[in-house]
C-alpha cells in the first residue's frame, strides 16, 4: 500500500484542519492513516500524508463532482493540488 503525499493551498487553514470531509471522502475509498500538515512560513499551504490501498480508485474519485464539492467545502484551491506517490 503506497503512502501518498498531497499538498495544496486553502482559503481558510483552520476550517481545512477541522473539516470532517477529508475523512469522509478518503475513508470511503479505504484510505487510512491520514495526517495533516501546515507550512509554518505560509499557513495557507497545507498537505496530507495517507496510505492508499487503490490509487486507481482515488484518482477516479478525484475526478468526480463529489470530490469537487468536498474540496469547495474545505476551501481547497484545486489548481494548486499536487499529488506525489511513494516510489
Image (cartoon, rainbow, N blue to C red):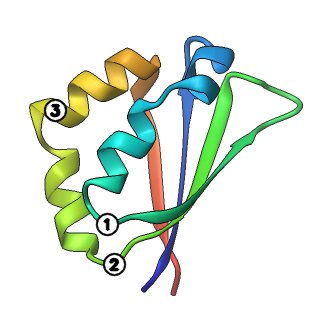
Spatial CA distance of label 2 from label 3 is 20 Å
The tally of labels here is 3
What residue would you read off at disc 1?
A: 30
Q: CA distance from mark 2 to mark 1?
A: 6 Å
Disc 2 to disc 1: CB gap under 8 Å: yes
The residue pinned by badge 2 equals: 53
Other-residue count near label 2 (Cα within 10 Å), few / some / many at <14 / 14–19 / ≥20: some
Q: Secondary structure at mark 3?
A: helix
Q: Residue at the far right: name it.
A: 41
Is 6 on the left-hand or right-hand side of 68?
right
Give the CA separation, mark 3 to mark 1: 16 Å
39 on left or right of 28: right
Q: Quadrant of residue 64?
A: top left
**Disc 2 secondary structure class:** loop
Spot occupied by residue 3 in the image (x, y as percentages of width and height)? 52, 75
Q: From the image, state whether disc 2 or disc 1 is nearer to you.
A: 1
Q: Is residue 46 above or below residue 82?
A: above
Q: Residue at x 46, y 31 (%)?
A: 20
Residue at left offset 56%, top offset 12%: 11
Q: Position of residue 22 (x, y in %)?
A: 43, 39
Which quadrant, please, contains the N terminus?
A: bottom left
* Residue 63: % across, % down: 15, 44
Front position in the image: 65 or 20? 20
Q: Secondary structure at mark 1?
A: loop
Look at the picture and state if 36 lies above or below 56.
Answer: above
Residue 66, numbered circle:
3
Pointer 1 local density, CA inside 10 Å: few below 14, some 14–19, many at least 20 = some
Seen at 46% across and 82% down, the residue is 2
Left or right of 52, for residue 25: left
Foreground: disc 3 or disc 1: 1
Q: Foreground: 28 or 79?
A: 28
Amino acid at each position: 500500500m503506497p503512502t501518498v503525499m498531497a499538498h495544496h493551498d486553502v482559503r481558510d487553514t483552520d476550517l481545512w484542519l477541522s473539516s470532517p470531509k477529508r475523512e469522509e471522502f478518503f475513508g470511503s475509498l479505504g484510505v487510512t492513516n491520514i495526517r495533516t500538515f501546515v507550512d509554518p512560513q505560509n499557513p495557507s499551504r497545507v498537505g496530507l500524508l495517507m496510505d492508499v490501498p487503490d490509487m486507481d480508485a482515488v484518482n477516479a474519485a478525484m475526478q468526480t463532482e463529489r470530490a469537487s464539492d468536498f474540496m469547495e467545502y474545505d476551501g481547497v484551491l484545486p489548481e494548486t493540488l499536487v499529488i506525489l506517490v511513494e516510489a
